[in-house]
Amino acid sequence: MLAVAAGEALRALPPPLREGPIARAALAGAEIASLSACATRAGVRDRDGAGRLAAAPVHEEAVTGTPFGTLLHFAKTPHVEQPRVLILAPLSGHFASLLRDTVRTMLADHDVFISDWHNARDIPVGEGAFGFDDYVAHVMDFLRAIGPGGHVVAVCQPAAQALAATALMAAADDPCEPRSLTLMAGPIDARVSPPPSTSSPSAIRSSGLPGT
């Protein structure tokens, strides 16, 4: 890949040249280009229950989309009836392909969908802004496209949006409300409104529970 080769050549330059503004800008451009190229193909194949590669490959298909993102489905041939799961990939500075290993692992036991957010530099300004509310709306639309009974796994940044989308769908009694919600390393502080399971040891001791 040309971008990868260019990046390697720039990193091999002597420090005085490599640290110059022109070389640093060129290296940043090469890294972005190589990430963009990698993002176009997830390179995922099916696995069986033991984690071994299955004979039939998985193919990517676009289910729905907007100028800001596409819902991708890792479809299996022949189709296998498994729990449907929507993996929400981070948006800022990331590509869905960075969750390749997560998708590979979940493919063994799930029908996997993923949010493939488009690179901001490729979206025309005329499409308008994409804020928190738009992100939440996309999550709800993606869940409706998957259908009732789906599950959600939000990785890092989209944890807050996934939580908001799930709450709104639950309040509206939406039939496509996710059956489960998994939030991984997201920007949510559970201490703001702690349930009993996250109470401090001092609070547990003060409750007079035996053995504390």
Image (spheres, helix red, strand yellow):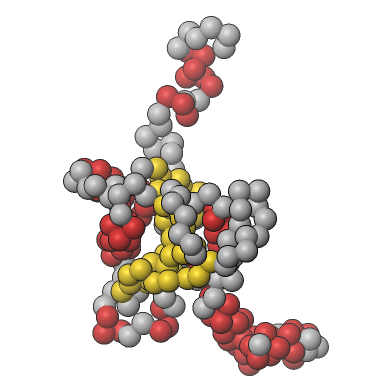
Q: Residue furthest left?
A: 172
The picture quadrant where one finds residue 127 is bottom left
Residue at point 46%, 64% (across, down) = 75
Position of the C terminus by quadrant: top right
Q: Residue furthest front?
A: 78
Residue 187, position in %: x, y? 45, 51
Q: Is residue 101 left or right of residue 65?
A: right
Residue 77, position in %: x, y? 49, 64
Q: Is residue 154 left or right of residue 175?
A: right
Q: Is residue 205 above or below residue 162?
A: above
Q: Is residue 42 above or below residue 196?
A: below
Residue 58, position in %: x, y? 53, 66
Residue 211, position in %: x, y? 58, 9
Across the whole image, how many numbered discs are drawn on residues? 0
Residue at point 31%, 74% (across, down) = 66
Q: Does residue 97 show up?
A: no
Q: Does residue 126 show up?
A: yes
The picture quadrant where one finds residue 1 is bottom right
Residue at point 47%, 71% (across, down) = 60
Q: Is residue 152 above or below residue 23?
A: above
Camera-side residue of 199 and 46? 46
Camera-side residue of 71 and 34? 71
Q: Is residue 38 left or right of residue 188?
A: right
Q: Is residue 42 left or right of residue 62?
A: right
The picture quadrant where one finds residue 158 is bottom left
Camera-side residue of 13 and 59? 59
